[in-house]
Image (cartoon, rainbow, N blue to C red):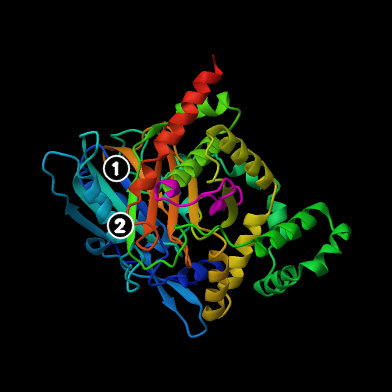
């Protein structure tokens, strides 16, 4: 079935930031965002196709293919959309028991399968007969979208805008903004408090100027002597740029290596969000502090279980996307985010000491501009020759072991075509030689962890995922003891 033809097919130049993500595709790492949505019962296929037609395709980028020009730039070109290609239907086999592993294997394969550049760069896979570890049979939708269309924050917002807050509401013709991401308890919002709209506009320099600026930053000695003559914001911006450019290489653990392109995906069972909040309050930390400390504990426990030497000073750097959209631009597609380097203390075994160190490091990140500088670097990359982009990209890849996304979702149930959304997970791609991605998403009072690893890094991400709950339970026990 073809969508209605667009009366006038439009052609639009792709931004340099989006072009940078388009050009980052490699054999070992595809620049593709993958989401898994789990529904309590199968949806009516006709209604689902109508929702895709009227809501998702209202965004021009989801009905546009990408073309490239001789200068290295790219364009969005609208075309008719064949929903028979973009919506695939499949079914898992089962023998009366959980087949979650089969679903994870299917998602792993799709994560390493390129999208066709002859069509708009997205696809949805409806998977029937998904039996969970709780014995419940659900329907899954695996969504794949190229990073050049939108970043993970925007894409999750687009997906959620396709839902309704009640099960039997008549299908809408346009996406609703009411189901956008909830900023309440957003763990990264405080990191960007000083970045106001005027600040973003003031440093919205041309690509040429940013290129010169970043070369100046590379010569830190020349700049350090001038900081006293600059305003506070400009000084902090320059200092953060220097920090970003001068980061030391990350710790050499078994989780660093050259990816080969075979992916493995796993996700945890949901954890109650209210329990995490209570534990954080009892131990003097935020929800995000508790989550990050648990992730660090799980990774450290995994490394020790493999027989590795993990001194107490061992760290693991994860690059965390931070939303940089202005107020009112939450539903605009494209890439509008920067990256903040979060250093996880994986070597600290004591849960309380680890939580305290995570809290201290999070406090140091607040009020900085590293995310803004990182976004500017992406703009520069999209306007440079691809060979130079690859070299700069690999330089930054050496500084980190993982990409981590933490997105707060709606805390009330959502429905599509009459079916309730039970769970939602997603993974952002890793670039360069980074071979691990961690995702955290909260929805309807629960939190779930997802992990994607490359074959060269870890062949069974379950070995890391299954250690998260025990690390969190240690904090629960210590929180209970603190009340006595």
Q: Is residue 3 above or below residue 382?
A: above
x, y (%) of residue 437?
44, 54
Q: Quadrant of residue 38?
A: top left
Q: Residue at x 68, y 54 (%)?
A: 369
x, y (%) of residue 460?
32, 52
x, y (%) of residue 166?
34, 33
Helix, strand or loop under label 2: helix
Magenta segment boundaries in residue numbering: 303-330
Disc 1 crowd, CA 10 A, few/some/many (<14, 14-19, 20+)? many
Q: Nearer the viewer, residue 166 or 134?
A: 134
Q: Nearer the viewer, residue 23 or 156?
A: 23
- Circle 1 is placed at which residue position? 38
Disc 2 crowd, CA 10 A, few/some/many (<14, 14-19, 20+)? many
236 left or right of 325?
Answer: right
Q: Residue at x 52, y 75 (%)?
A: 390
Q: Main secondary structure of the magenta part?
A: loop
The answer to whether one can see residue 173 in this image is yes
Helix, strand or loop under label 1: strand
Q: Nearer the viewer, residue 473 or 134?
A: 473
Q: Nearer the viewer, residue 155 or 330?
A: 155
- Circle 2 is placed at which residue position? 108
Q: Is residue 376 above or below residue 412?
A: below
């Amino acid at each position: 079935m073809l969508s209605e033809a667009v009366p006038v097919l439009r052609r639009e130049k792709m931004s340099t930031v989006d072009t940078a993500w388009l050009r980052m595709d490699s054999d070992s790492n595809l620049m593709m965002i993958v989401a898994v949505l789990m529904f309590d019962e199968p949806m009516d296929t006709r209604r689902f196709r109508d929702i895709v037609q009227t809501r998702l395709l209202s965004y021009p980028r989801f009905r546009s293919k990408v073309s490239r020009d001789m200068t290295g730039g790219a364009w969005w070109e609208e075309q008719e959309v064949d929903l028979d290609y973009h919506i695939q239907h499949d079914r898992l086999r089962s023998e009366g028991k959980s087949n979650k592993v089969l679903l994870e294997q299917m998602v792993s394969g799709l994560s390493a399968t390129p999208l066709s550049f002859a069509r708009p760069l997205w696809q949805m896979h409806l998977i029937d007969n998904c039996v969970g570890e709780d014995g419940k049979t659900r329907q899954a939708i695996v969504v794949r979208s190229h990073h050049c269309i939108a970043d993970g924050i925007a894409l999750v917002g687009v997906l959620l805008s396709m839902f309704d807050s009640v099960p039997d509401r008549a299908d809408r013709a346009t996406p609703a903004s009411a189901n956008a991401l909830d900023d309440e308890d957003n763990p990264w919002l405080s990191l960007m408090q000083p970045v106001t709209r005027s600040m973003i506009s003031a440093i919205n320099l041309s690509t040429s100027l940013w290129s010169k600026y970043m070369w100046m930053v590379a010569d830190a000695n020349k700049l350090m002597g001038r900081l006293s003559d600059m305003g506070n914001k400009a000084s902090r911006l320059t200092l953060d740029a220097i920090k970003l450019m001068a980061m030391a290489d990350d710790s050499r653990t078994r989780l660093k290596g050259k990816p080969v392109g075979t992916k493995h995906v796993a996700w945890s069972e949901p954890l109650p969000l209210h329990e995490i909040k209570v534990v954080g309050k009892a131990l003097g930390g935020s929800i995000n502090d508790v989550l990050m400390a648990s992730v660090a504990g799980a990774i450290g426990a995994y490394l020790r279980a493999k027989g590795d030497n993990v001194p107490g000073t061992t760290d693991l750097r994860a690059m965390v996307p931070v939303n940089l959209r202005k107020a009112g631009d939450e539903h605009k597609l494209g890439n509008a985010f920067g990256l903040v380097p979060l250093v996880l203390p994986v070597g600290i075994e004591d849960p309380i000491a680890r939580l305290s160190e995570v809290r201290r490091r999070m406090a140091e990140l607040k009020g900085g501009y590293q995310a803004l500088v990182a976004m500017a670097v992406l703009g520069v990359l999209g306007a440079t020759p691809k060979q130079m982009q690859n070299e700069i990209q690999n330089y930054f890849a050496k500084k980190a072991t993982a990409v981590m996304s933490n997105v707060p979702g709606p805390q009330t149930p959502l429905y599509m075509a009459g079916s309730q959304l039970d769970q939602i997970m997603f993974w952002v791609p890793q670039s360069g030689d980074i071979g691990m991605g961690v995702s955290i998403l909260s929805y309807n009072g629960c939190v779930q962890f997802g992990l994607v690893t490359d074959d060269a890094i870890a062949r069974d991400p379950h070995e890391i995922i299954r250690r998260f709950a025990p690390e969190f339970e240690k904090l629960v026990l210590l929180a209970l003891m603190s009340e006595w």
